[in-house]
Image (tube, rainbow, N blue to C red):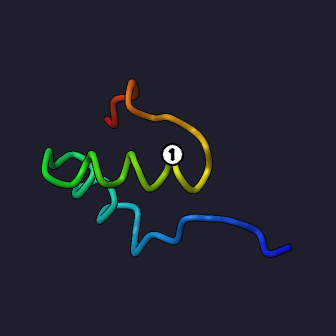
């Protein structure tokens, strides 16, 4: 079985997009679907 992981372009790119309201929901759903972890209540600093 292939390991499941989320490949990111870079840490800073992910932080920038995750902080934007337009993209945050998308990333939350992708992470939840891929890993089963709900990160909706977490805040990225």
- Would residue 18 appear left or right of 30 to someone viewing this image? left
- On the image, the x and y values in percent for residue 22 come to 13, 52
- Residue at the location (27% across, 46% down)? 25
Q: Is residue 24 above or below residue 12?
A: above
- On the image, the x and y values in percent for residue 23 come to 21, 54
- Would residue 1 appear left or right of 24 to someone viewing this image? right
**Position of the C terminus by quadrant:** top left
> Looking at the image, how many numbered discs can be counted on the residues?
1
- Residue at the location (29% across, 65% down)? 13
- Would residue 20 appear left or right of 13 to someone viewing this image? left
Q: Is residue 19 above or below residue 11?
A: above
- Residue at the location (76% across, 69% down)? 3
In the image as oriented, which residue stretches furthest toward the top?
A: 41
The residue labelled by disc 1 is 32
**Position of the N terminus by quadrant:** bottom right
In the image as oriented, which residue stretches furthest toward the right?
A: 1
Viewer-proximal residue among 26 and 13: 26
Q: Secondary structure at mark 1?
A: helix
- Residue at the location (26% across, 47% down)? 24
Q: Is residue 13 above or below residue 34?
A: below
- On the image, the x and y values in percent for residue 5 come to 63, 65
Quadrant of res 43: top left
Query: Few, some or many C-alpha atoms within 10 Å of disc 1 (few <14, some 14-19, many ≥20)?
Result: some
In the image as oriented, which residue stretches furthest toward the front?
A: 33
């Amino acid at each position: 079985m292939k390991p499941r992981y989320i490949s990111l372009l870079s840490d800073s790119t992910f932080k920038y997009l995750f902080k934007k309201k337009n993209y945050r929901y998308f990333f939350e759903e992708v992470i939840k679907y891929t890993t089963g972890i709900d990160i909706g209540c977490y805040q990225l600093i």
